[in-house]
Amino acid sequence: MKVLILFFIVFNLQAQIADASFFSSVKSINPGVIHLGKESFTSLEYSQEEHVKHHDVPLGGIVGGINTNVDLKRNNAFLGLRGKVIGAEVLYDKSSGEYVQSIKNPTRGDRTITNSAEAKFIGGNLDLYFLGLSYGKSEFKFLNEFRVGLVPDLTAHDELINLTYSNLLVGTAIPISIFRLGFYYLIQNADGNYEYTYYDGTTGNKGSVETTDVTLKSKGLGIGLGVTLLKFRTEFSYEKMNKASATFKSDYPGDVAVSESSSRLSMVSELKFYSFNFGVTYKIMKGNYSDLFDIIASNILYKNLNSSDSRNELSFKFSYGSSKGFSPSLFYTTSEIKNKELSPVFDNGLEYEAVTKVTAFGASLSYAF
């Protein structure tokens, strides 16, 4: 059994529903494809993402709209064991994000607020050749400190969000000659609480606190069809999540995000050329579709997306190296979404144009023996 020790950077490059990737360290969405891979491996990863959002809100003397930057950093450890019949994967992922919102207002003064979010994910996949099982848990925490103006004309509140997500997924993959067919069924739940703190606008002192328990439940499915040759593979897949059902206090003053139905259409192509591997992935996501280990941006930037809002993502990937020795890799990802959203400052029920751009890039070094 060959063991790969990989220092790799990955940003949403996985689209493995019908077959395993040529890039061994890419996590499988469908656990039923694990046994189709060729190598066992372990990896340590670090990645960075930048989300830049411009919200064109022209009210209240605001100049240049509301601008938001979210910088995400991620560390994870990944272990994969692959045999002819049974395969397994274990992933631990820790993410942190800095949320900076800036407003220029000559009347009430410029404002820059910096908040933080963190998430931890641990999950495992087990492939029994004919059936794959996956279970994962993710803890999400976000403190949003809202401030407009100064004492004695201050508008302020804090909102603390603590949620624990869980995923249970069952899938399978069937090779038929050069063709690959895979599908899965998913149950996703979340439990936790929201805490809303009032402030006195004339003194700036803390006021009363309101809390609510929150329960979210949703289901999803995915199907993939691909072709795999000795040096080339391509795959098309479609994934769908239904609208989440939610339970919380109806008079809670904060914004409990309940995702609309969402979907992800993916195309991935990979090529082997001597010791080189090349990969390209293109995704079209509608609504707030996201993976369980990528919930910071989902809960901060994309929580209010409608099911018709579309986000396109393009990723390139490259690696060099044989089955033994060192193998460096590079990747680049870009994404953009244009939509209309309610103002986070003015509660007037009106929606305004928003544009969010995402970039990620990195390098890796692997060693196989």
Image (cartoon, rainbow, N blue to C red):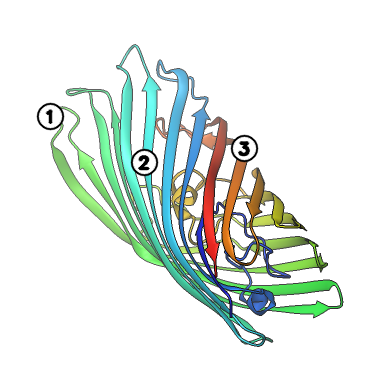
Residue drawn at x 52%, y 54% as measured from the top left:
365
- Quick one: SS at disc 1? loop
Asked if the residue under mark 2 is in contact with the one under mark 1, i.e. CB atoms within 8 Å, the reply is no
User: Looking at numbered disc 3 in the image, what kind of residue is underneath it?
Assistant: Glu
Of tags 1 and 2, which is closer to the observer? 2
Residue designated by label 3? 336
> Is 339 in front, or is 79?
79
Q: Earlier in the sequence, mark 1 or mark 2?
A: 2
Residue found 87% across the figure and 77% down from its top: 177
Vertical relation: 15 (above or below) 303: below
Q: Answer with left or right where residue 276 lies relative to residue 360.
A: right
* Residue 159, horizontal then vertical, whole percent: 30, 47
Inspect the image, locate mark 2, and give the three-letter code of the amino acid beneath it: Glu
* Amino acid type at image mark 1: Thr
Residue occupied by mark 1: 203
Residue 202 image-quadrant placement: top left
Count up the numbered dots. 3
User: Callout 2: 10 Å neighbours few (<14), some, many (20+)?
Assistant: some
Label 1: how many residues lie within 10 Å, few (<14), some (14-19) or many (20+)?
A: few
Q: Which residue is mark 2?
A: 98
Measure how far apart labels 1 and 2 are at the Cα level.
28 Å
Q: CA distance from mark 2 to mark 3?
A: 20 Å
Give the left or right position of residue 203, taking residue 360 as reference: left
On the picture, is 44 further left or further right than 116?
right
Q: Is residue 9 visible?
A: no
**Mark closest to the chain's N terminus, 1 or 3:** 1
Name the residue: 26% across, 34% down.
156
Instruction: State the residue lying farthest toward the top.
Output: 106
